[in-house]
Amino acid sequence: PPSLDWVRGHFRWVVWKLAAMERAFPAIFGGKCLTPDKVYLQIVNRYDKEVRGSKRSVLTKIQEKDEQNTAYMILCVSQVVQCDSKPVRLLLTDGWREADASLDDELARLVRLGRIQAGHKVRVYGAERGKPSAGQTTGLVLT
């Protein structure tokens, strides 16, 4: 059976995804996605893929050093952590795991202008491995 930490981590991203679908398309998905049954089915599906099927997300592969951190990936900004300080930091997710990302000056400028914000997707290629902040397992530097 999955560990409590595994369930907590996936529960967070399943709820985040389903709530985002309801907010983005209320006429189609309003009140239909974020239900206990849908959350449960998503958790079971992830368990089947990750544990039984041995399929892992790109951030998991990077964390376990089975994938180069320079791999092409599409990540979603889950949170702007620091905007007014250097370095600007974001939390990025592949929908399964989260990574702490420090940004270079140009990307930091786009965050400060509001061009990159929570919920936006970013294409990442050539990220450098960075030191993760407290509570994070994967750190990236985006340039």
Image (cartoon, rainbow, N blue to C red):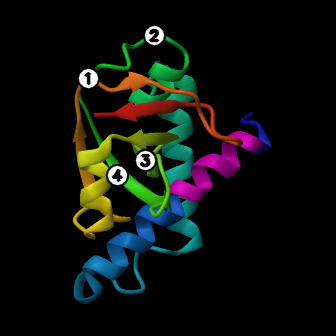
CA–CA distance in space, label 1 to label 4? 16 Å
Magenta stretch mostly in which secondary structure?
A: helix
Does the residue at mark 1 contact the one at mark 4 (Cβ under 8 Å)? no
Q: Which amino acid does label 1 sit on?
A: Gly
Secondary structure under the numbered disc 2 in the rendered image: loop
CA–CA distance in space, label 1 to label 3? 15 Å
Residue range in magenta is 5-13
Q: What residue type is labelled 2?
A: Asp
Rendered location of residue 121, percent (x, y): 26, 53
Q: Name the residue under label 1.
A: 126
Q: Mark 2 points at which residue?
A: 66
Does the residue at mark 4 contact the one at mark 3 (Cβ under 8 Å)? yes
Dot 3 alpha-carbon crowd within 10 angstroms: few under 14, some 14 to 19, many 20 or more: many
Residue 76: which disc?
4
Residue 92: which disc?
3
At 58% from the left and 48% from the top, the residue drawn is 10
